[in-house]
Image (cartoon, rainbow, N blue to C red):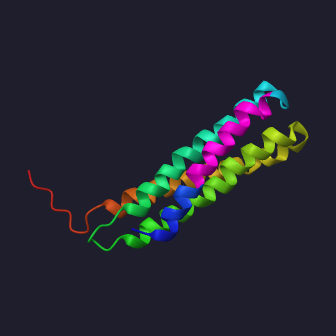
Amino acid sequence: MHPFFLKIAIFVSALSVALGAFAAHALKNIIPAASLITFETGVRYQFYHAFAILIASTVMYKNGHQRFVVIACRFFSFGLIFFCGSLYLLAILGSEFHFLGAITPIGGTCFILGWILLFVSIYPKNYNHKN
């Protein structure tokens, strides 16, 4: 288990709940419905990837691919910042900050790379295919 990323996953999960409640109770009266949907998308992906970090931080294999798990957690973390963070800012700051939308795909790419690296981390070192 990787204790640093386990702590990150727990913190990000709690933050997801807090941000979701904030959106449901406070933001719904302040920002337009389309912006609220954008914010909620950020919360949803934040929660998904908090669980991804939780899963990745608990993956322990004897095949020596732990380096890939750590890098996957880093990509998930950067994805949270760039993808979710840009959606939160877009939702709250409004359309005049539309240039922030260019950051969102960077975060999405980080999420995808994290999932690929997590897959690579669990692939057996000596795969013997038997028919």
> Which residue is drawn at the image coordinates 67% and 35% (left, top)?
40
Q: How many marks?
A: 0
Furthest residue toward top: 33
Q: For the stretch drawn in magenta, what is the main secondary structure? A: helix
Is residue 41 placed above or below 100 in the rendered structure?
above
Is residue 83 or residue 43 the one in the foreground?
Answer: 43
Relative placement, left or right, of 34 versus 122 is: right
The reply to whether the magenta stretch includes residue 15 is yes
Image coords of residue 62 (percent x, y): 26, 71
Q: Position of 81 compared to 97: left or right? A: left
Look at 73% across and 51% down and name the residue there.
Answer: 103
Which sits in the foreground, 119 or 17?
Answer: 17
Q: Position of residue 59 (x, y in %)?
A: 36, 62
Up-down relation of residue 37 to residue 109 (above or below): above
Residue drawn at (32%, 60%) of the image: 122
At 30% from the left edge and 61% from the top edge, which residue is drawn? Answer: 123
* Above or below, 43 relative to 49: above
- Residue closer to the observer: 44 or 12: 12
Q: Is residue 14 left or right of 23 when viewed as pictured?
A: left
Residue segment shown in magenta: 12-28
Give the quadrant of the N terminus. bottom left
